[in-house]
Image (cartoon, rainbow, N blue to C red):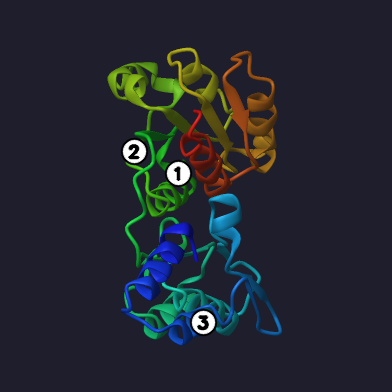
Amino acid sequence: MNSVALLELLSAIKEGKITPEQGMHRLTHWPGEDIEFANIDHQRALRTGLPEVIYAAGKTDAQVVEIFSRMARQGGNVLATRATPTAAEAVCARVPGAVYNPLARTIALRQQQTPSAIGPLAILCAGTSDLPVAEEAVVTAELLGHSVVKIVDVGVAGLHRLLAQREKLATARAIIVCAGMEGALPTVVAGLVRAPVIAVPTSVGYGASFGGIAALLGMLNSCAPNVAVVNIDNGFGAACFAHAILSNPTS
């Protein structure tokens, strides 16, 4: 439950649309709900501005379905990342409105229109092979209420493709850049803009890329001072960090 949902519930009780007892029933599992294999944090959005999200990797399909459906009952938006096709099929069969994005490997349920955060947020990827990570960031950011500008296949091997997007980059309040191989793209982008750049190394590349470690080290050693780096393939984390920047009233 986020602040919007809680205010709506309190207003409904105040206006007599629902009884206090009905409101209490809605809050039965608040702030947390222990379901033996998980303890769902329904209060996280109120504390941190970011709702709890299901990391589906390593969970059984039945576990993902149960957690997702219980979170959906609270009336807020729900997101599961790194979901398998079978888990997605099971969730979508149980929860009406749930949508699977096979490229991003996400399952999303939008039950509330999140207030639009200050934006836009630009999300770039160096090559088509980086798209799954970038798409995970897109799904996450949009569910958090951001207007996203997606720019794809603008890696440094064809620098003219990036320069052709300078107008879009100039209007972005924050920029997420996903790149593998040598991981040079975030530094190049950061040299063109005033916005904070969140670099996401991807596990794309030949043997010497070491599964994204080469890109990670390159980004950590960026000579651009407005670059911050998240973990390898962590499009979700990049979107959450961008949200924390853009939703801060003092930013």
**Residue sitting at x 44%, y 56%:** 104
According to the image, label 2 marks what residue? 150
Residue 212, position as x, y percentages in the image: 64, 39
Image marks 2 and 1: residues in contact by CB distance under 8 Å: yes
Q: Which mark is residue 126?
A: none
Answer with the quarter of the image where residue 184 lies.
top right
According to the image, label 3 marks what residue? 24
Crowd band around label 3 with a 10 angstrom C-alpha radius: few (<14), some (14–19), many (20+):
few
**Residue sitting at x 38%, y 78%:** 92
**Mark 1 or 3: the one toward you:** 3
Answer with the quarter of the image where residue 182 lies.
top right
Secondary structure state at the residue bearing disc 2: strand
Residue 40, compared with residue 66, is above or below; it is above
Side (left or right) of 177 relative to 208: left
Secondary structure state at the residue bearing disc 1: helix
Residue 25, position as x, y percentages in the image: 50, 85
**Between discs 3 and 2, the one toward the N terminus:** 3
Secondary structure state at the residue bearing disc 3: helix
Q: Is residue 135 visible?
A: yes
